[in-house]
């Protein structure tokens, strides 16, 4: 029993650590972009545009992503979304040195922010659904608390870290942090053994309701 308990705790903490690393990198870079746009443009319209691109795609895709998290491998969804975010950031790192027009840079950053938000919208429901698979039911509140604490630390530390990094580094150097944290997070997540969830489609659910209804009639 002690061996089994140590095993699931190790898997759960490894998973939480991987997500803390990727979340910190992503949040730091997203805040760095907002700081950069604010400094470069001094325009509320540009900041508003980046805010919309950073959150609206995530909101829109989250409805479908919740269904995908129930039907498909959550581990693959998380890794795929992380990889998409890192790829978009990497392409931006390659492009920035060759762009001289500031408006083009801002437009490219807008597109990158939208792609990153899209990836986060896929990743978040899958991440939220994994923890109950790894942790026993009587321990889930405790580990949800640990997860919430980690997220609070990220939300508190990332903006300050982003502002500090931008004062001593270029935007390109700051973007590379997201790529590095994504690689580290994916590497740790790859070592986590996540149980396969039982996929339910609409037909299975309808059949289950039909059988339950007949059971009620039989009971009566």
Image (cartoon, rainbow, N blue to C red):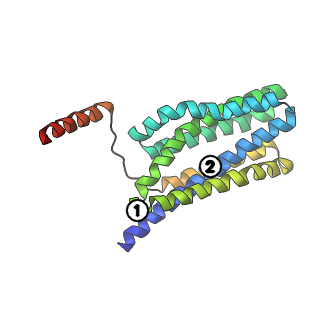
Mark toward the start of the polypeptide (2 vs 1): 2
Image: 220 above or below 41 = below
Which residue reaches farthest front?
A: 220
Residue 89 seen in this snapshot: yes
Callout 2: helix, strand or loop? helix
Residue 102 location, x and y as percent? 84, 29
Which dot marks residue 89? none
Quadrant location of the C terminus? top left
Residue 191 location, x and y as percent? 48, 57
Image: 72 above or below 28 = above
Give the number of callouts.
2
Q: Nearer the viewer, residue 44 or 84?
A: 44
Residue 47 location, x and y as percent? 78, 33
Quote the CA–CA distance across marks 2 and 1: 26 Å
Residue at 20% in and 35% down: 213
Residue at 25% in and 35% down: 209
Which residue reaches farthest bottom?
A: 2
> Would you say 184 lies left or right of 142 here?
right
Image: 35 above or below 132 = above
Residue 112 seen in this snapshot: no
The residue pinned by badge 1 equals 138
Residue at 58% in and 55% down: 148
Residue 111 location, x and y as percent? 68, 29
Q: Nearer the viewer, residue 40 or 157?
A: 157
Residue at 32% in and 31% down: 202
Q: Nearer the viewer, residue 209 or 106?
A: 209
The residue pinned by badge 2 equals 23
Q: Residues within 10 Å of mark 2 (few under 14, many from 20)?
A: many
> Would you say 51 lies left or right of 169 here?
left
């Amino acid at each position: 029993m002690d061996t089994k308990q140590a095993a699931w705790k190790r898997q759960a903490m490894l998973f939480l650590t991987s997500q803390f690393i990727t979340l910190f990198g992503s949040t730091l870079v997203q805040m760095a972009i907002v700081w950069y746009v604010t400094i470069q443009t001094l325009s509320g319209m540009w900041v508003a545009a980046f805010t919309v691109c950073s959150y609206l795609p995530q909101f829109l895709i989250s409805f479908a992503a919740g269904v995908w998290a129930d039907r498909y491998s959550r581990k693959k969804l998380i890794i795929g979304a992380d990889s998409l975010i890192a790829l978009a950031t990497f392409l931006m790192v390659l492009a920035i040195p060759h762009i001289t027009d500031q408006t083009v840079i801002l437009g490219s950053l807008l597109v990158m922010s939208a792609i990153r938000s899209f990836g986060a919208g896929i990743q978040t429901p899958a991440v939220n659904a994994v923890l109950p698979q790894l942790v026993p039911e009587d321990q889930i509140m405790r580990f949800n608390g640990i997860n919430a604490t980690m997220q609070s630390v990220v939300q508190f530390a990332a903006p300050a870290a982003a502002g500090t990094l931008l004062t001593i580094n270029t935007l390109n150097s700051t973007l590379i942090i997201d790529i590095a944290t994504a690689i580290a997070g994916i590497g740790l997540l790859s070592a986590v053994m996540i149980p396969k969830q039982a996929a339910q489609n609409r037909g299975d659910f309808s059949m289950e309701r039909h059988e339950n209804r007949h059971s009620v009639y039989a009971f009566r």
